[in-house]
Image (tube, helix red, strand yellow):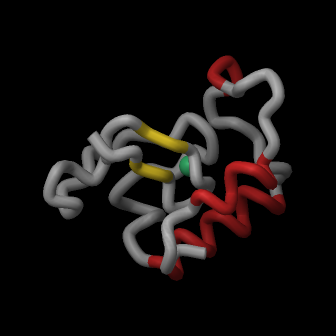
Amino acid sequence: MEVWYCRVCGLDYDESPWGPDGHTPDFSTCACCGVEFGYQDYTPDSARAYRAQWLAAGAAWFYPNMKPHNWQPGAQLPQVPAGYH
Ligand SMILES: [Zn+2]
């Protein structure tokens, strides 16, 4: 199983919310940036726009109770897949 990284914030997932074929999003929500997979991350431009908005708002976790204790946005953001930076 390959690790999948959020196209907006770079959070790692055990399974792709875009489905095994990469084209079937489940419209779940990223615990970190709150993007709805299949919606705001549909294109590199929309992912960038959502990321800019999220960062400008303070990069808060959508589900704060899932935020790792020593979380650093600067360490996670470089995990955003190539093409979505
Ligand atoms: Zn995310």
32 up-or-down from 50: above or below: above
Q: x%, y% of residue 10?
A: 58, 53
List x then y, in percent, for residue 11. 57, 45
Q: Nearer the viewer, residue 19 or 55?
A: 19
The residue lying at 76 percent from left, 41 percent from top is 60
Depth check, front residue: 61 or 85: 85
Q: Name the foreground residue: 24 vs 53.
A: 24
Q: Is residue 16 left or right of residue 67?
A: left
Residue closest to the far top: 65
Left or right of 19 in this view: 62: right
Residue at figure coordinates x 40%, y 45% from the top left: 3
Residue at 27% x, 53% y is 18
Q: Position of residue 13 (x, y in %)?
A: 43, 39
Residue located at (78% from left, 59% from top): 55
Front position in the image: 2 or 58? 2
For the C terminus, the quadrant is bottom right
- Numbered circles on residues, count: 0
Image-quadrant location for residue 64:
top right
Kindly indicate the quadrant of the structure image that contains residue 31. Answer: top right
Residue 76 position in % (x across, y down)? 69, 50
Above or below — where is 75 with respect to 70?
below
Quadrant of the frame with the N terminus: top left
What residue occupies the far front of the structure in this picture? Answer: 1
Furthest toward the left, the residue is: 21
